[in-house]
Structure formats: C-alpha cells, structure tokens
C-alpha cells in the first residue's frame, strides 16, 4: 500500500486577511514534509463556493506551487469537475498538461461532476446532464493529449479542429481517475479503465465488495484513454500521535469540523430532485449531527487512521485486505491541528507505520499494469 | 467550545416578534393524516445576509440563502378540504435542514385553528389556490382582495424511480408553549405517489404581506409537484430561539416511540 495526501484547504471563520494565505502556505509545507517522509502522491480537490469547507478552487495553481518545491511526489489534479458550465474539457487538458510539464511528468488527473447546489447552481449548470458530460469528457481529454489536433461534435460540447496545447510530458498521457462516492460509480470507473478514487473516509467493510467488483469489471473494460489505470485509492483521516487518547480527541474534533462544515453546504439531493443524484455525496455522509448527544463517546469510524501507530497500522491493514492499492489522507481540517502537530504526525507515521507496508507490490503494478498500452 | 459554536454563521434576529406568535396551551399530540394530497414546493435563492437577518440565533443559515414556498392542497381530511401554504427561509439546526416559517395561509377556518394551536403555524385566512396545468403549477394567495403571492413551477416534467422523492425541510414555527417561547418543529412524513420537477418563478411577491419585506427572489433552485399521502406527526422537538442545537438548545417533548404508541 502506498500513501498520499488529500488537500481540501479548508479555512474556518473568522476570515482574517491572512487566514487563507496561511492555510495554503501550511499546505505546501505539509506536501514538502510528506515527500521527504515517503508519501507517494498529493491530491488537491477542485471546489467552488464551499465556504470554510474547501477554498481549493484552483488546484492546479496550488499543485504548481507544490511542484516547484518538490521533485518526486505525484500531483493529483482534481477532482476536476467535468461539467461544461464550469470547465471546458480543453481547459482541463491544457492545465493538466502544463502542470505535467512543470512538474517533470508527475500528474494524475481525477475527474468528477460535483454534488452540491452551491457549485452546480452557482454556475447554472445543467444538473441532469452531469453524468453524460463527465462521460464525454473522460473520452475526449485523452484524445486532446494524444492527437496532434482534436475536433469534436458531442452533446455536452463541440469544437472545431484545434491543436490543444501543450501536450503532457507523460506518454501516452497522465493517468486518469474518477472520484467514487455513490455506489455504482466504481463500475463506471472500471468500464472506462479509470483509477478508482473512493472518497468515503472510512467504512472499510462496505468497500470490500465494491473494490472486488471494480477489479473484476476492469478486466474487460474499453478504456477511455490510451491505457488502463487499474488502481484503487481509499481516503481516510490521519492523525498519528504517541498518545492514543489525545489523538482520538483531536481526530474527533476534525471529524466534527468536517461534519459541521459540510452541513453548511446544500447537496443536490436536497435542492434539486434528480435521477442522477440519488445518494448524498461525500458531504452528506458526515451530516450525522456530530454534536448530538448520540454521537458522544462513539468510536472513531472504522478505517480512519487516528490514534497511535499501532492503531493506525491495524486500520491500514484493513484497507490493504479490502483491496486498496493506496490510502490518501486528510491530515487537518478547519485548522483543528496546529502546523507542528500535522508535521509531527506525518513524520511519526513515516517512521512507525510506513515500514509495515510493502510498497514494492504496488511498484510492480505501476510498471506492469498501470501503463498497459491499449493495443 | 465546539468548532460549530466558534465559527459558523448563525441567525441574527434576536428580537423575534413574539407578540403575535401562536400559543400552544399544551403539547396535545395532535396528528393529521391526509391521503392523496398535492404538495407544491418552490425553492429560490435569496442573499445569505437576508436569510441571516430573518433567522433567530438558534439556527444557521442555509448557504446559499434560499426561500421556500410549501403548499399543501388537501382535498379530503378529517378537518375537511383545506389549503395550507407557508413561506419560509431555509436554515439548519446543527446538521439538520429546517425552514423557519415567515408566514402561513389557509382557506379553512378549522384548519387555521388546528395548525395554529397544534404546531404553532402563524396561519392567516386567505383565498389560497393551487392550479395544476400541463405547462405550469401555480400557487396563488389572495388576502383582503389583494393578490399577495403568485408563484409557479414552469414546465414540470415527471420524475421516475428513486429520483422521484423530494427532500423537504421540516418547518420551525415560533410559538408560546408550556415550555416557554420556543421554535416548534413540525415533522411531516411523506409517502410519494408521483412527482414532477420544473423551474420556479414568482409573479407576485408582496413582501410586507408575506413577512419578508424584501424584493422578489429571482434565482430559481427547483420547483416540484408531488402527489403523496402525508402525515403531520405530533410535536416531538422544540428549540430555544437563542441557543443553537450544538449548545443544547433542543428539547425533546415526546419520544418517538411514545408518539407511535
């Protein structure tokens, strides 16, 4: 199992002049420490208008800053929202390719369609069409990267022949992923040969069958891109501290912060009944009223990596046994942890937890399977 | 001090006018079952600052700000045929989505007493009508001979399968209760028969008459028309108007099991 970070860049109120700047600066330092500690990848999300929850509206800019101060860690651009009112696919292709050049070929591209009224409503997006536009994008973007010139007549976008520039450094192109929250999206990923980035934050047991279904279905996929990116990444929280009780208390506060910040956001399911948004998205999963009396004293949810090193090793073994190739971590939220606590957590994790996991297995996978070129 | 208490926006209306608030002499456990009701629900955006100004400190504003029209057209019930239309600002109590009632109208005097005394709706008598046409669904309120509200859902299209369910926010009504001046939560449950979704639009919006003295909301979210069996359940929760749920502002009036029994 490999390890990575998932940067939301949440900014709690009060929004003082330097609050956002400090969050971004801290995040860049966290990425530097993560690279030196052996973390393999950092994802930066794309969100718009999600007050406090995430101020990461321009992930490629944040990742470019990260690229300038790192040399090895892979850069996960996304989840890039594949909705025409928010992003033209050529703009996603251009920005990802530019980042790939600037980072010397370290980019992964995550795709998705958003699940909030704040975002889709804010851009006046056609909510009923987001699945269709996502599908069209994931097939078009690799062609923009691999063909000298690209033209398209489609349902969510059309364009006359143009040379989409620059082209990415990685050949044939950067790996493509899709964010998986709703049940069934892992099958969408598998059928298109895309990496499966599950954003469930816990509930390991619930993913065993879904990961297995992904592995089975991807064997017969028709890849959207030029190769099959068979990878399963799971998301979790990380706070590693020698004092387990203290870690759990801080972890609980991060969960509370996430729950309360996400509850400020209006899910599509609440605002706009639609057959393509049957389940609450990622945000809705944590609306279980974290401050209600019923939540007091409850254990940290299954699979979250909060505790001392031994507890975290146990949680990660469960993800490994479930079939995850990598686990990506939220390492702070709403600035609950101080910067020194975050960095110490990363370093302790690297020293005490990482050695218990064999990275070579996934290295082989990357070499032999990840870049299986389409015949 | 929790993260919620420290950071999140809350309502700023500390001076709710309790003078004309309904009085619940007791939590009498009243319920009402209505079969085959039509429910017209329109959501449109308003500025967050406007929502904050309307809401009491107990609740957080919905972001973005949203105003809701919820119209029950009930052709048959134990209290006769009635219309009940409310205008409300969406909000949340802790993580639960709610809506704070600004005004309410009915065309049935028995329903007026029933909903005012049982759940604290600030119900006024008016001529309330729901017109269901193929190109639009229209809710109209005429009070004292003047049209104060005219809102429609344009071009409704049928929703099918699991996507046909609508998530309604439960209402909060300010009322004098045996527990003091409280926000009374109305729990309504729905058994959906069919539903349609379209684009909501106000044609007449008399803010002063509607308890929202502001311009007509413009940005549409969604409009829905649902045929459902609905149940107004007995009051289970009341909230202190100035204390958030996170800080212990919710009081359980009746446990769910007791209500069922």
Image: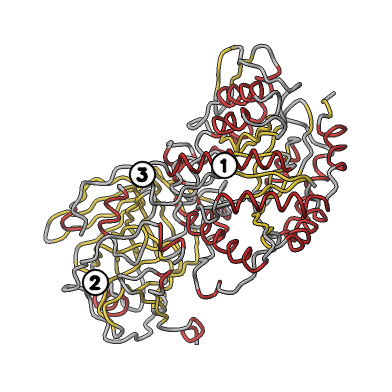
Residue B194 versus residue B7: which sits nearer the camera?
A: B7
Would you say the residues marked 1 and 2 are in contact, meaning their CB atoms lie under 8 Å apart? no
Tell me how far mark 2 sits from mark 3, CA to CA.
30 Å
Q: Position of residue A231 (x, y in %)?
A: 77, 41
The quarter in which the N terminus of chain B is drawn is bottom left
Q: Residues within 10 Å of mark 3 (few under 14, many from 20)?
A: many
Kindly report which numbered mark, 1 or 2, lies closer to the viewer in this rendering: 1
The verdict on a common chain for dots 1 and 3 is no
For residue A142, above or below residue B96: above
The verdict on a common chain for dots 1 and 2 is no
Would you say the residues marked 1 and 3 are in contact, meaning their CB atoms lie under 8 Å apart? no
Tell me how far mark 1 sits from mark 2, CA to CA.
60 Å
Q: Residues within 10 Å of mark 2 (few under 14, many from 20)?
A: many
Marking on residue B108 = 2
Work out whether residue A145 can be spotted. Answer: yes
Residue B230 versus residue A256: which sits nearer the camera?
A: A256
For residue B143, above or below residue B216: below
User: Label 1, on which residue?
Assistant: A27
Marking on residue B220 = 3
The chain under label 2 reads: B
> Is residue B78 toward the left or the right of residue B14 in the image?
right
Q: Position of residue A273 (x, y in %)?
A: 49, 51
> Is residue A283 toward the left or the right of residue A344 in the image?
left
Residue B65 versus residue A294: which sits nearer the camera?
A: A294
At mark 2, the secondary structure is: loop
Which residue lies at the image location 58% right of the left edge and 58% below the top edge?
A: A285
In this rendering, the count of numbered labels is 3
Q: Residues within 10 Å of mark 1 (few under 14, many from 20)?
A: many
Q: Position of residue B218 (x, y in %)?
A: 29, 43
């Amino acid at each position: 199992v490999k390890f990575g970070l998932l940067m939301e860049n949440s900014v709690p109120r009060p929004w003082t002049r330097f609050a956002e700047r400090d969050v971004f600066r801290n995040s860049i330092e966290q990425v530097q420490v993560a690279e030196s500690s052996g973390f393999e990848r950092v994802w930066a999300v794309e969100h718009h208008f999600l007050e406090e929850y995430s101020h990461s509206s321009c992930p490629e800019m944040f990742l470019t800053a990260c690229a300038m101060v790192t040399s090895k860690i892979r850069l996960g651009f996304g989840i890039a929202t594949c909705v025409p009112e928010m992003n033209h696919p050529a703009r996603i292709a251009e920005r990802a390719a530019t980042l790939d050049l600037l980072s010397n070929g370290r980019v992964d591209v995550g795709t998705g369609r958003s699940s909030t009224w704040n975002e889709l409503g804010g851009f006046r997006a056609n909510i009923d069409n987001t699945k269709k536009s996502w599908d069209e994008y994931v097939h078009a973007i690799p062609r923009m990267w691999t063909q000298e010139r690209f033209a398209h007549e489609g349902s969510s976008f059309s364009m006359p022949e143009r040379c989409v520039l620059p082209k990415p450094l990685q050949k044939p192109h950067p790996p493509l992923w899709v964010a998986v929250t709703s049940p069934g999206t892992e099958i969408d990923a598998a059928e298109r040969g895309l990496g499966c980035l599950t954003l469930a934050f816990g509930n390991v047991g619930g993913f065993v069958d879904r990961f297995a279904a992904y592995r089975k279905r991807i064997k017969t996929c028709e890849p959207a891109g030029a190769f099959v990116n068979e990878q399963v990444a799971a998301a979790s929280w990380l706070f590693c501290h020698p004092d387990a009780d203290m870690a759990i208390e801080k972890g609980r506060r991060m969960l509370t912060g996430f729950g309360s910040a996400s509850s400020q956001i209006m899910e599509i399911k609440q605002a706009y009944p639609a057959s393509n948004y049957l389940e609450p998205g990622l945000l809705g999963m944590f609306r279980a009223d974290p401050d209600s009396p019923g939540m007091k004293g409850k254990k940290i949810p299954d699979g979250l990596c909060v505790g001392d090193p031994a507890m975290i090793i146990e949680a990660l073994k469960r993800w490994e046994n479930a079939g995850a190739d990598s686990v990506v971590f939220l390492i702070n939220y709403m600035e609950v942890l101080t910067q020194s606590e975050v960095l110490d957590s990363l370093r302790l994790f690297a020293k005490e937890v990482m050695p218990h996991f064999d990275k070579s297995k996934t290295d082989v996978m990357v070499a032999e399977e990840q870049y299986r070129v389409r015949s | 001090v929790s993260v919620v208490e420290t950071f999140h926006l809350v309502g700023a209306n500390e001076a709710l006018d309790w003078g004309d608030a309904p009085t619940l002499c007791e939590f009498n456990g009243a319920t009402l079952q209505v079969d085959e009701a039509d429910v017209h629900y329109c959501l449109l955006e308003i500025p967050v600052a406007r929502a904050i100004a309307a809401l009491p400190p107990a609740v957080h504003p919905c972001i973005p700000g949203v105003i809701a029209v919820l119209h029950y057209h009930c052709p048959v019930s134990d209290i006769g045929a009635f219309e009940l239309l409310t205008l409300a600002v969406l909000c949340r109590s802790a993580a639960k989505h709610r809506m704070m009632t600004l005004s309410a109208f009915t065309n049935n005097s028995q329903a007026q007493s029933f909903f005012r005394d049982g759940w604290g709706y600030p119900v006024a008598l008016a001529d309330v009508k729901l017109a269901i046409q193929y190109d639009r669904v229209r809710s109209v309120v005429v009070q004292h001979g003047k049209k104060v509200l005219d809102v429609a859902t344009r071009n409704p299209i049928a929703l099918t399968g699991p996507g046909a369910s609508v998530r309604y926010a439960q209402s909060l009504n300010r009322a004098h209760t045996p527990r003091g001046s409280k926000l009374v939560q109305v729990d309504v449950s729905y058994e959906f028969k069919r539903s349609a979704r379209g684009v909501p639009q106000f044609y007449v919006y008399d803010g002063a008459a509607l308890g929202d003295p502001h311009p007509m909301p413009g940005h549409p979210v969604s409009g829905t028309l649902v045929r459902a069996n609905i149940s107004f359940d007995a009051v289970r929760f009341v909230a202190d108007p100035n204390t958030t749920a996170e800080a212990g502002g919710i009081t359980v009036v009746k446990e769910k099991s007791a209500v069922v029994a």
